[in-house]
Amino acid sequence: MKTSYTVFLVSGMLLTGTLNTLLTKLQDLQCVGNCDDPDPKRRRLFEQPTWQTLNMFAGETMCLIVLYINILWTNYRLKRRGYRELMTASLGSPDDDNVIEPAALDIPGAVAPTRSAESSLETDSLLPSTLDDTRPLIGRRKFLMWIPALCDICGTTLMNVGLFYISASVYQMMRGAVVIFSGIMSVIFLKHRLQRFQWAALMLIMLGVGIVGMSSVLFPYRPPVLDDGVGGRGPAPDEPSLFAAVASSAMEFSERSLLGVLMILTAQIFTAAQFVVEEKIMLRYHVVPMRAVGLEGIFGFVTTAVGIPLLHLVIGRSHPGGYFDMVNGFYEVINNPGVWSTSIAIMFSIAFFNWFGLSVTRTISATSRSTIDTCRTLFIWMSSLALGWEHFQPLQVLGFLVLIYGTFLYNGVVSPPWGAGVDKSVEELTADGSGRRLVDDE
């Protein structure tokens, strides 16, 4: 039963994690202007990164809704069957991934049970090994989650813009750079100690990311024309000089690819800061992971919803049709079935991905999460190739292999080639370099 349940969780995490990126890329390829023009270069695609960020936080907010529904159901069961009986029945059950500690959820009159080695309510990879010195994240303390939400807004918006300019597989591979920044930040701000082989692994990850980025610039991404005729930017077929057209187009797409790569890398700094702040909060306060995700979601949603009209007033009005044109973005969303349908799909996919991710972390080791995330990148790459969204590039394969090895080495999945032992504490590090990261948002 436990094996089949684990397979279900891992499969669900891989599926939803892959869909998060592919659906976002599919949304980027939706034509929203001049769609009947025979020249793909003159068509205008959907490019609204702030609306996509809002959509992501809506998906995370759904986690909070599900959590409070679970609280109501838990209260009902407490009253009907008795708290001690409920808690006893839930211990050690792999199916009760959403069992909540009533004391942590502010249920009146509830007393937290004695924690035992068999308890499946929390895991050491999500929370500190002891809760004696931690306080519940309640009242005004909840607003601490606004800090990582702000980092998430900056990082996600930059990544959304970067995805306009590069392929989905390169986008996912470049996100592996977060290990570099989070590892360094954890040493500076959290006083973590990295072993020598981990520093070597960071160098390998940096090399792998560099090779992947160079591949994207040397062989730039060209948005495809979808089967229904929409999407795609490419050189006009009736240019007077074919050589001039190809040279000009290659330069344009190389510059766009370089810009996309730089944006993704910059976004990883904000994402790493988000991880470090989250770990700092989790070290000081006790909070159920699903609630933390939901709090970040609602804080991020509110901030983005307020920021969109402000950015429109400051920037959008003077740059109509741009990234911060709120009115144009709103009409592009509601008037294009391909855009709003993918928005709904992305929202649910992100919500389920967070649930699957937290459940997987409860069920298997954190190092296994590193392997799953690697498979997720591979599935995104294979799917993009199968859909015809990008072309096979040997240089990208080389960069991906170096990136995989560096990530596995950093997380202790593989041993260093020089035979140094891997400290057991390393096995509790997640793929982003932070010991208590909840779950990757996308």
Image (cartoon, grey):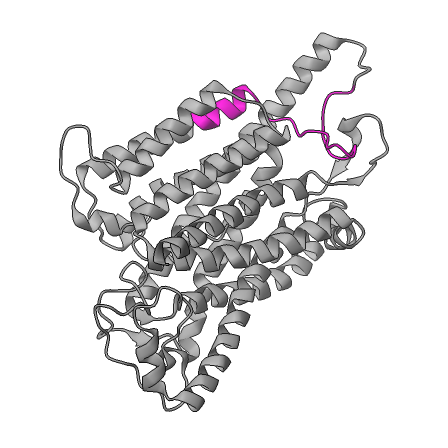
- Lateral position of residue 183 relative to residue 39, left or right: left
Q: Which residues are magenta?
A: 211-236
Q: Is residue 53 magenta?
A: no
| Camera-nearest residue between 179 and 24 | 24
Q: Residue at x 63, y 31 (%)?
A: 387
Q: Position of residue 283 (x, y in %)?
A: 28, 65
Indicate the position of residue 81 as horizontal and vertical percent values. 40, 88
Is residue 178 shown above or below 261? below
- Left or right: 231 in relation to 76: right
Q: Is residue 235 magenta?
A: yes
The image quadrant where one finds the N terminus is bottom left
Asked if residue 169 can be seen in this view, the reply is yes
Please tell me which residue is depicted at 32% across the width and 52% down the height of the picture: 434
Residue at the spot 41% in from the left edge and 57% down from the top edge: 5
Q: Position of residue 368 (x, y in %)?
A: 33, 46
- Majority SS type along the magenta span: loop
